Image (cartoon, rainbow, N blue to C red):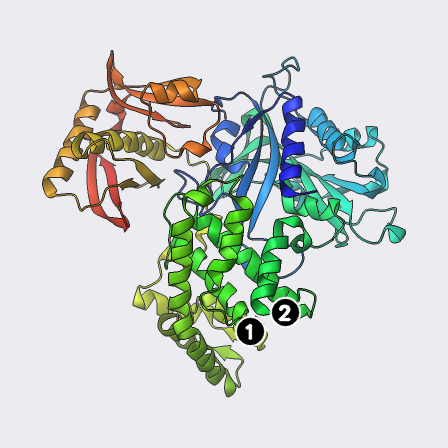
Amino acid sequence: MTSKGLRKIFLDFFKSQGHIIIPSSSLIPENDPTVLFTTAGMHPLVPYLLGEKHPEGNKLASCQKCIRTSDIEEVGDKTHLTFFEMLGNWSLGDPKAPDGIGSGYFKEKSIKMSYEFLTSKKYLGLDKKYLAVSVFAGNENAEFDKESYDIWKSLGFSKKRIAKLSQKSNWWGPAGQTGPCGPCTEIFYWAGDSQTIPDEFNADDDNWVEIWNNVFMEFNQVKDGNDYKLSFLKQKNVDTGMGLERVLSILNKVNDIYKTEAFSNLIFKIEQLSKKKYNESPEITKAMRIIADHLKAASFILGDDKGIAPSNIDQGYIIRRLIRRAIRYGKQLGITYELWTKEVVKIVIHDYLEQYPELQRNADFIIDQLKTEELKFKKTLSIGLKKFKKIIKNKTNGLISGKEAFNLYQTYGFPIEMTEELARENDLVVDKEDYLKEVKEHQKLSRTASAGKFKGGLSDARKETVRLHTAAHLLLAALRQVLGNNIFQKGSNITKERLRFDFSYPEKLTQEQKQKVEDLVNKAIKDDLAVKMEEMELKKAKDSGALGVFDAKYGNKVKVYTIGKDNYVFSREICGGPHVKHTGELGHFKIIKEQSSSAGVRRIKAILTHI
Ligand code: GLY
């Protein structure tokens, strides 16, 4: 089975079950400042899980590209990945409605569909004797998921194969600090020796590989003072996630994600470049896995239409870490080929361009950025490593000081995580607190890159962000009036305090242009224009002049937000929402900064005052 085959069989199955197939969203969440990357298929669906109506209906399925950065350092074994694809199906509420197209479902149907897909010969045809499941055992906030337990029993699972597990393993979400969440039931497959398959399921045994998670999202985690509490969502949702590469490794009986077709061309290329074999030694296997994973992930972030390049903040910092870590392991493998990373990246683009055409569109950018970063880092890597050896040579206290770590970062471009990893390899630790003090003093690293912004809260539908989101639509319309119709949105990021908006334009805006833009937005606010939402076919939306961000991401049916009065249209955009009802709710709009974001892209930061 190939990635392509598995995507198809999964999506076809859910289509036959009345689901609409939606395209993968961007890896960079739109309008969500609290997380750096899309980490699960549910991520772009958060507004709909919270109760917004999805334009395509309430039964959806997708194959979503995802990045998880929490365990970059774990990559190197046979299961961890930074970039992966997640197959998923959703029901957005309404489990009681008649079970036809358009109506939702909940636990029973969800579990039964998963079971059918996994075991039926028509689909994956896995033998049930290799399967086990877990359900939520209950805690002081939510009760034992007896319903799921009974459904699995009715499907013939013995008590020994249904584990009742705690919140740590069987509660999913929220993806950030707040948002939809709920108990989940996970499905495991015995990937060990078939002769030794135990009767009883033990989730701590690595041979049981988790392959699919069904989350029953009926709760919303909200902030409660300094704490969090659960409330019921307006609707009962189903959210499932199945890691494509993991399932491939099961279907192909390789028990190593990197031995699947999702990595075969990449590993082959790395073998060629290093003149070594994947299985030659554990160190070589580990290095090849790291290189393959990291350069794949870096390519996907660079190729995500947002023009994000390696830098010292946010997503750019992650790209930098990934590329530099890959280069360090390339050095370990003895790759001497000049500017080799781009050769690996070309394979990523080739392997994935059919499913993710954005990689092809951005191929030149991806390759250029790889070249530049590799040149930059190579210049200092060898001397930096020598410097590191010197630092550790006479250590007696086992500690690398903040100053030393900061010097490695600033002078030799070693991301702190890399220094920490090198330290660990030599039984040392970095004094992180001391390092962060150094950083603060030098004001070099952005707060987000080092402080782990990735753990923020999702679904930021607070009043402030909704207002700023509507203001962003007004801003785009105003920019087009002032600068012309070749202005397009390149990205946006909204916090409670401000909006940040990137758009295509080659030059700095003059004071006069900025003033005009501000005035136009404020006039639109003063006129108290209505904000109306309509659902329509994508083609109709485009024909009606609605602006979109990136074509490839939309499904066949979309939501269009029009801001205007009577027949007058000030702004019309394809957008998931939510928005305010009238622009009069926005207060006063003010541009606080206009600067370059990347080549040909300008960035505006703006706020709303006097609300
Ligand atoms: N959202 C379900 C999962 O990631 O497992």
Which residue, given by chain and number where applicable, does mark 1 sit on? Answer: 334
How busy is the neighbourhood of tag 1: few (under 14 within 10 Å), some, or many (20 plus)? Answer: few
Q: Examine the rendering and report whether any part of residue 306 can be seen.
A: yes
Kindly indicate whether the residue at mark 1 contacts the one at mark 2 (C-beta within 8 angstroms): yes
Which residue, given by chain and number where applicable, does mark 2 sit on? Answer: 276
Tell me what residue is drawn at x 71 percent, y 46 percent. Answer: 210
Q: Is residue 116 above or below residue 271?
A: above
Q: Quadrant of the C terminus?
A: top left
Amino acid marked by disc 2:
Lys
Q: Quadrant of the N terminus?
A: top right
Outermost bottom residue: 394
Mark 1 C-beta to ligand 1 under 8 Å: no
Q: Position of residue 139 (x, y in %)?
A: 67, 40
> Dot 2 lies on which element?
loop
Q: Is residue 276 left or right of residue 304?
A: right
Amino acid marked by disc 1:
Gly
Q: Quadrant of ligand 1?
A: top right
Q: Position of residue 262 (x, y in %)?
A: 62, 49
